[in-house]
Image (cartoon, rainbow, N blue to C red):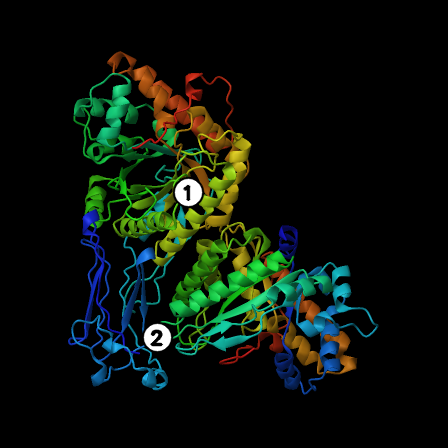
Amino acid sequence: MRSQYLWTASRKEENVSFASFTWYTEKRERKYVPESGQKRGWQEDCSNQSSAIHIQKASFHLTTHIPCVPPEPEAMASATLLKSSFLPKKAEWGATRQAAAPKPVTVSMVVRASAYADELVKTACQDSYKVTTHIDPWMNNHLKVLLIIINYCKVEDSLEKKTVASPGRGILAMDESNATCGKRLASIGLENTEANRQAYRTLLVSAPGLGNYISGAILFEETLYQSTVDGKKIVDILVEQGIVPGIKVDKGLVPLTGSNNESWCQGLDGLASREAAYYQAGARFAKWRTVVSIPNGPSELAVKEAAWGLARYAAISQDNGLVPIVEPEILLDGEHGIERTFEVAQKVWAETFYYMAENNVMFEGILLKPSMVTPGAECKDKATPEQVAEYTLKLLHRRIPPAVPGIMFLSGGQSEVEATQNLNAMNQSPNPWHVSFSYARALQNTCLKTWGGRPENLKAAQDALLLRAKANSLAQLGKYTSDGEAAEAKEGMFVKNYSY
Amino acid sequence: LIKTAKYIATPGKGILAADESTGTIGKRLSSINVENVESNRQALRELLFTAPGAFDYLSGVILFEETLYQKSSDGKPFVDLLTAGGVVPGIKVDKGTVDIAGTNGETTTQGLDSLGARCAKYYEAGARFAKWRAVLKIGAAGEPSELAVKQNAEGLARYALLCQENGLVPIVEPEILTDGGHDIKTCAAVTERVLAAVYKSLNDHKVLLEGTLLKPNMVTPGSDSPKVGAEVIAEYTVAALRRTVPPAVPGVVFLSGGQSEEAATQNLNAMNKLEVLKPWTLSFSFGRALQQSTLKKWLGKKENVAAAQATFLVRCKANSEATLGKYAGSGDGDAAASESLYVKGYKY
């Protein structure tokens, strides 16, 4: 089988340069140009052999097919490889098929095991006893291999709270981009200046005892490097509180060409070097939010793109020491019922896990941030917390391997109380993974309103935050009751066509 | 489907794989110099199914088509015998493997044609679960190839869906052969790759995972490689499963694939002793590893039946204890039990 392909796939108009493959018949050389900053890559020396690279554009999936037969001189086409002259003549077809018995070729592919494997697991979850990982069989013998096994054990109160997936704790998502933060500030009549953003974030992270209920905080880039007015780094305050700092690393949603008006998430370019820098600044986990819209289909393309982007991001994050939080948000917008959400969610998660497996992502070192399975916001039939819990748990049981340590749900526009109740319903019996929260609006809403931008309201605002954090902490332990919840907390926060 | 699957996965019980095709059972019988005729095949199966006490440790038995319609010597259909004893009868439904052209000796499994109709028929005959064996191998050139993995995964998914449509719980069996000189890490990586592809296909085909069982290989070094201890095998195997098998699957019933009876039991035991969260039960679906020493005791002679049945009971009990992590090892050092059952390039 002779295979001569010229293939360049680049999507420059979307500011992403994908892989570029060039196959020169004269030189018989093949190069794979990895994304910049990435340490992975493979080279193949195929000096007397030809091989084929198949790229299925729809799924961005790379396979190497290796039947290798030295090409016969008369079969070599010219450099403009798209001529049909390389196709065998009909008469030869039988003969060439016989001759093309594949000779096995060993390709040395270097897939580096993450040097951060141990740390990733420790950040994600509690005590790992033994540490051994393995690598895909395409590896060189001299590479180090370790396989990770996690033991779940009871966390004693005195145990150092280093891990994100610890009982009774969840994540505070405070990674609103400047534009989004501006909307929040505007809602309480404040101007969107750095000083105001700094004041607000300082308020959040210095709430006393926050670390009892919050294990991690997702920051925006600006916040990662920010200090308080007293000159103390926000990251340091978090660490002192026993809260692991995390960082949003995606670059937002843009329209997905060729889809049904859907979006995809940018951010892979230079991701590795950015994450390495964030690691230096103290971040230990990362977040990437992509969306899937049910009213728009979702189209097969959009689902695949979402899943593949997450898988790439997860692999790169692990390579640079950050635990990736994998967030394919299925938007609340729509009139669909809970069954439809369930169906779409199953598909999305099947794709996501498969692509992550293909990208050699280590599941013991990731966290998930799914949306709960609920009816659409405009659906006539509302669902009780028990129904939401039933569907969501069924989804998790069918799609999430037990190796994943933690699942931290997003609130996505539910009211503060709704989000807490649903979480509580899910934790009424033990689960194979830590089922917790990663809330933004559902933690901050009342706090923000209470603050109103006035320093004298600081304590009251922090108390409001702690109140919600504690409620959700109890929900994580399955012990929450909604007695005493204020009316405001029950107010829905769904905004149609909300863009972050 | 869910109820049946859950029952088969009861801790403390497992599956006897007695579904050797006529050709394969012929090899077993010839190894003890017994002629491969229907009466002998029936006699062997009757020996196994009437072993006193064995049913306490078995939740299912996989049968070959011939056996599904056979009766015991006193005229009772085997299926009824099993069902009365609380053992679910199952049926092998695949039609063997064929080579995939263009690969280096890799195979795909046949049997999808009219599978739905056949399953319906088997259901009527009393079967409640089915088995389909996909075979993959690890090779120096990176086998299993993407093509082989995809093919076999898709085949398994189609089979599973058809079974469920006709009331049978599908046992999904992607066996990765031990043949080769690879180390345990390679086997682990390949197992994870294959299981990920299998579950992707099952999910894409909308198979009800709660109504399936998985029959994987244990993660071991290749047959030509140095042996490792049961704890190591247990760690790698459980890690691979934790990374690929969703908790919705009620049970994982391992194949023995040429391990000796004793080794298979020890490995299973080690896995169940591992202090790690395993949301599925880990049990057995052994063929050779349950029958080997029994066969050697029987030798085809009526007078040996009782002794052979006693041997069979010993193995069933041992594996039952292994599923609970309580197996203490066979103190008697039975040589037959420790004999490796590996045959290079074994063809079923």
Residue B259 location, x and y as percent? Answer: 54, 72
Which one is in front, A336 or B308?
A: A336
Instruction: Name the foreground residue: B121 vs A428.
Output: B121
Q: Relative to B88, is A281 above or below? A: above
Front tag of 2 and 1: 2
In the rendered view, tell whether residue A364 sits above or below residue B91. Answer: above
In the image, taking residue B302 as reference, residue B241 lies left or right, namely: left
Within-10-Å neighbours for mark 1: few <14, some 14–19, many 20+: many
Can you give x and y, in whole percent of width and height, for residue A192 in the image?
Answer: 20, 23
Label 1 SS = strand
| Residue extending farthest top | A456
Residue B251 screen position, x and y as percent: 57, 56
Q: Quadrant of the C terminus of chain B?
A: bottom right
Tell me where residue A91 sits by quadrant: bottom left
- Residue A208 position by quadrant: top left
What's the chain of the residue with tag 2?
A: B
The residue pinned by badge 2 equals B141
Q: What amino acid type should be assigned to the residue bearing mark 1?
A: Gly
Q: Position of residue A2 (x, y in %)?
A: 27, 78
Q: How far apart are the two marked residues, 2 and 1, measured between alpha carbons?
A: 37 Å
**Residue matched to label 1:** A406
The answer to which image quadrant residue A244 occupies is top left
Q: Element at badge 2?
A: loop
Are the two marked residues, 2 and 1, in contact with CB atoms closer than 8 angstroms?
A: no
Q: Amino acid at mark 2?
A: Ala
Is any part of residue B195 visible from this angle? yes
- A367 w.r.t. B60: above or below: above
